[in-house]
Image: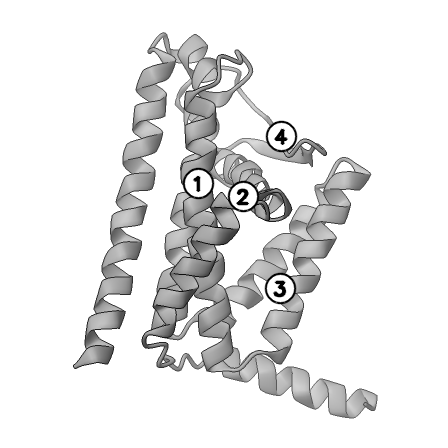
Amino acid sequence: MSWPEFVDQLGSRLASSLHPVAPQLGDRLIWVLVVAAVVVFGPSWRWVRPVVTVIHELGHAAVGVACGRRFRGFVVSPDMSGHAVTKGRARGPGMVLTLAAGYPMPGFIGAVLIWAAIDGYAALLLLAMIIVLSIALVKSRSLFTAAIVIALWAVVVVMWWRGNEAWNGILVSGLGLIVLLGAWRHLFAVAASRDPKQDPAALAKLTRLPAAFWTLIFAVLIGACSWWAGHLLYDALTQTGR
């Protein structure tokens, strides 16, 4: 492919991303849900867990920046734990919101991905993900973290460049379901943990509200995102059946 041809294709792909076309996913959404559940609750979870961890840490960063803090970088460890570093006041509402953002964020992003897939915004959202992951690469503070981000970036680029409306809808809805179910799996893990470094314990120390309270708040927020996603999926399936 020559350089002018590449530029033409890139321009065409960018233009098509800005003009949403809702795909007819139909009963394929049921199979997408089944596959997502097998991925999250089966042996392959260890391969997709980094996606949820990266969203968790970038959730801390995004809310921290929105609260006026400075995002210095983040790390994902080989055991799939991680931490994001933001600079600002050590106490106060901004710090509380920054700490509280991690666990609900995969639930929110998962629901947004499902909405985008069903309403035809999958390509546009993939393009946004490419930009976010490019920024995340710059903020990676370990080789392992950079490798994870590069792998995710490459997968998203291929999905955006090669996929049509139908395939993007299937893949993005599948990714959304994996992230949403993964948010629940992460929450169950932290609920069973007594690690004082986990977010609920850190929030308990910061606010003097018990860690169980914060775990419950996370569950309510992820539950709301799950209700939204479920409503979208139900509508898509029932409208197809009419």
The answer to whether one can see residue 129 in this image is yes
Q: Is residue 95 above or below residue 178?
A: above
Q: Along the line of sight, which residue is nearer the eye, 118 or 12?
A: 118
Q: Which mark is residue 183?
A: 1
Q: Amino acid at mark 3?
A: Val
Q: Residues within 10 Å of mark 1 (few under 14, many from 20)?
A: many
How far from the left and from the top, in percent, is residue 79?
A: 68, 31
Q: Disc 4 on helix, strand or loop?
A: loop
Q: Along the line of sight, which residue is nearer the eye, 121 or 51?
A: 51
**N-terminal-most mark, 3 or 4:** 4
Q: Residues within 10 Å of mark 4 (few under 14, many from 20)?
A: some
Q: Amino acid at mark 1?
A: Ala
Q: Disc 3 on helix, strand or loop?
A: helix
Q: Disc 2 on helix, strand or loop?
A: helix
The answer to whether one can see residue 101 in this image is no
Q: Amino acid at mark 2?
A: Val
Q: Which residue is disc 3 drawn over? A: 156
Between the C-alphas of marks 1 and 2, the distance is 7 Å
**N-terminal-most mark, 1 or 2:** 2
The answer to whether the residue labelled 1 contacts the one labelled 4, judged by CB atoms less than 8 Å apart, is no
Q: Residues within 10 Å of mark 2 (few under 14, many from 20)?
A: many
Q: Quadrant of the N terminus?
A: bottom right
Q: Which mark is residue 81?
A: 4
How far from the left and from the top, in percent, is residue 72?
A: 67, 33
Residue sitting at 32 percent across and 32 percent down?
219
Q: Is residue 6 above or below residue 167?
A: below
The quarter of the displayed image where residue 130 is located: bottom right
The answer to whether the residue labelled 1 contacts the one labelled 2, judged by CB atoms less than 8 Å apart, is yes
**N-terminal-most mark, 2 or 3:** 2
Residue sitting at 39 percent across and 22 percent down?
93
The quarter of the displayed image where residue 157 is located: bottom right
Q: Which residue is disc 2 drawn over? A: 52
